[in-house]
Amino acid sequence: MADAYKPHVSGITNYIDLNKRYIEKAGHDVFVFTFGDQDYHDDELRVVRSPGLPIVNSGYYLSFSYNRAAKKLLQTMDVVHVHHPFLSGRLALRYCEPLRIPIIFTNHTRYDLYAQAYLPLLPEEISDGFFAGLYAALL
């Protein structure tokens, strides 16, 4: 599960792509659940996109739920790997935790440091507390 995937280019996107390919080579079916343009044609199998509102020109889409088909498919997974704590992380907890589907979370970014660098007016105590609570929910 990822907040953004191809065609958006980032370290996280590359990481997910590489992991997906290697796990598929080992004989497993790997699905990527994300948000995005419903008209985008993926060049790989098992990318499940739910609609969302584009966030400016960032490659990210804002949505607080998956479409019905994605939810139904997600709830059949043996394990779920989450790559973003915000939208995808919350959705993993909402859809998978009640069914006791194991959730793996990889933290790719020090969001606390991002907040200090890009939101300097936000007091450090608030940003640290927010991110600590978010991480604790996923752990």
Image: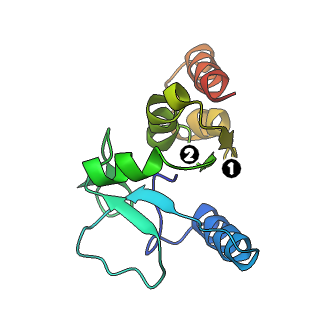
Asked if labels 1 and 2 touch by Cβ distance under 8 angstroms, the answer is yes
Disc 1 secondary structure class: loop
Quarter of the image for residue 55 reads: bottom left
Point out the residue furthest to the bottom here.
43
Estimate the x, y position of residue 129 in percent, counting from the top left: 61, 16
Can residue 86 be seen by looking at this rendering? Answer: yes
For disc 1, the neighbor class at 10 Å (few under 14, some 14 to 19, many from 20) is few
For disc 2, the neighbor class at 10 Å (few under 14, some 14 to 19, many from 20) is some
Residue 20 or residue 55, whichever sits in front:
20
Q: Is residue 28 left or right of residue 97?
A: right
Disc 2 secondary structure class: loop
Point out which mark residue 84 bears.
Answer: 2
- The disc labelled 2 sits on which kind of residue? His
Label 2 to label 1: alpha-carbon separation: 8 Å
Point out which mark residue 19 bears.
Answer: none
Residue holding disc 1: 108
Estimate the x, y position of residue 81 in percent, counting from the top left: 63, 49
In the image, is residue 113 above or below residue 81? above
Q: Is residue 139 left or right of residue 48?
A: right
In the image, is residue 2 above or below residue 40? above
Q: Is residue 42 left or right of residue 1?
A: left
- The disc labelled 1 sits on which kind of residue? His
In the image, is residue 38 above or below residue 75? below
Estimate the x, y position of residue 133 in percent, counting from the top left: 60, 18
In primary-sequence order, the first of circles 2 and 1 is: 2
Estimate the x, y position of residue 78 in percent, counting from the top left: 62, 48
In the image, is residue 123 above or below residue 37? above
Quarter of the image for residue 35 reads: bottom left
Q: Residue at x 62, y 61 (%)?
A: 12
Q: Residue at x 36, y 46 (%)?
A: 71
